[in-house]
Amino acid sequence: MLADHRPKICFLIRRQSATTLGAEPESLLEEMTYAADERWCVDRKTGPAVQKFIFRKLREIGLEEEDLKLCIFLTDQGGNIKVALSDTDFERINCAGHLLNRCLQACFKTKAKSQFPMPAEAVPTLKLMNQLKTLVTHCKQGGISFQLKTTLKQQCDTRWNTHVEMLASDITAYDELEVILANRKELLLLPTSRQQIQEIRDLFEPIRDIAVQLSASKTPTLHLVAPAYIEPICHFKEALQKHTENVFTKKLHDKIHKRAVFLDPSMKHFHFLKAEERVAVLTRVMADLQKVPMPEKIGAPTAEGESNLLFFL
């Protein structure tokens, strides 16, 4: 893997080790890390200049271009490194973990020209994240962090998974923060919806685990990319389905809507309900019918009976 970092350019070279059957997974890969101060690089970090620098430094450690023909360069999406390898015979692929982190960053940013603009419904979540970042900064600068039993984590785009760590640390310290900020008359800095913070954290926690898995340095990870990318798709679909179900359940908490369906002959079998829900609705319908007064004789219903029937219908 070749990565471009400032203020240093770091070559992390992994090669398959000669291992015997039953060897420990940690011994599957050998790592050789070479760091070069970027001042040794070039005055202009253009693609061609970076290309010359890359192969010059690789030659210095005994790797000629001929030796690299079977190699695949794994890099981030830096424009200069992409250009540097675009017009060569070498294959370059994007770092899956880096791409995943970029996707997570896009979840909490809103850009007018973005390919995936943030919907209006998601803006409150963005505001909550920004409020938490402001809170953490305030606690660190105001000395509040020293009064807490746990450490507050700050979110940073260049450090993977820190948004999940920030959410988790805020939840852990929430009760303490509530007391401290109330005493300082700064309670407005603390988001009131602790449940929402927990929900966001739970939503993105599995993605953090995937990023950690893809960042393993002692075992191969190339074969993990495909299943790792399928996993969050399934996770978010399931989370969306569960959230939608919870929302509609709360909105339709009044069972009268389901009981009204029973009065329509074409829908009285309740095929859209689960078995236990069908039994509950039928039981409630029968109980309601028992409450409706019936006239003593055949004929027009009494005034009271007519009123109750109309109310039920």
Image: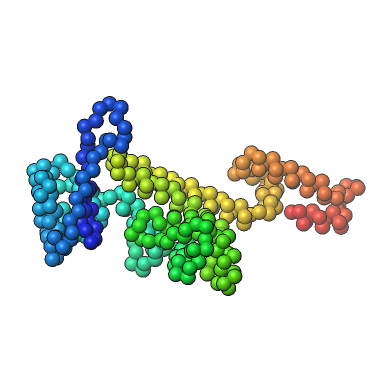
Q: Kindly give the residue lying farthest to the top in the view shown.
A: 21
Of residues 57 and 107, which is closer to you in this image? 57
Give the mark count. 0
Q: Does residue 3 sit above or below 177 in this rendering?
A: above
Image location (x, y in percent) of residue 231 = 40, 44
Left or right of 79 on screen, residue 215: right
User: Which x, y percent locates residue 180?
Assistant: 57, 66
Instruction: State which quadrant residue 119 falls in.
Output: bottom left
**Quarter of the C terminus within the rendering:** bottom right
Q: Residue furthest toward the bottom?
A: 185
In this rendered view, identify the residue nearer to me: 167 or 32. Answer: 32
Position of residue 56 measured from the top left corner of the image (x, y, whole percent): 10, 53
Residue 236 in the figure: left or right of residue 175: left
296 up-or-down from 142: above or below: above
Q: Is residue 70 left or right of residue 131?
A: left
Q: Which residue is depicted at the point 24% across and 30% down?
A: 19
Q: Can you see residue 123?
A: no
* Between 287 and 242, the one nearer to me in the picture: 242
* Residue 120 image position (x, y, % from top left): 46, 65
- The residue at 48%/47% (across/down) is 238
Residue under the image location 54 percent in, 66 percent down = 190
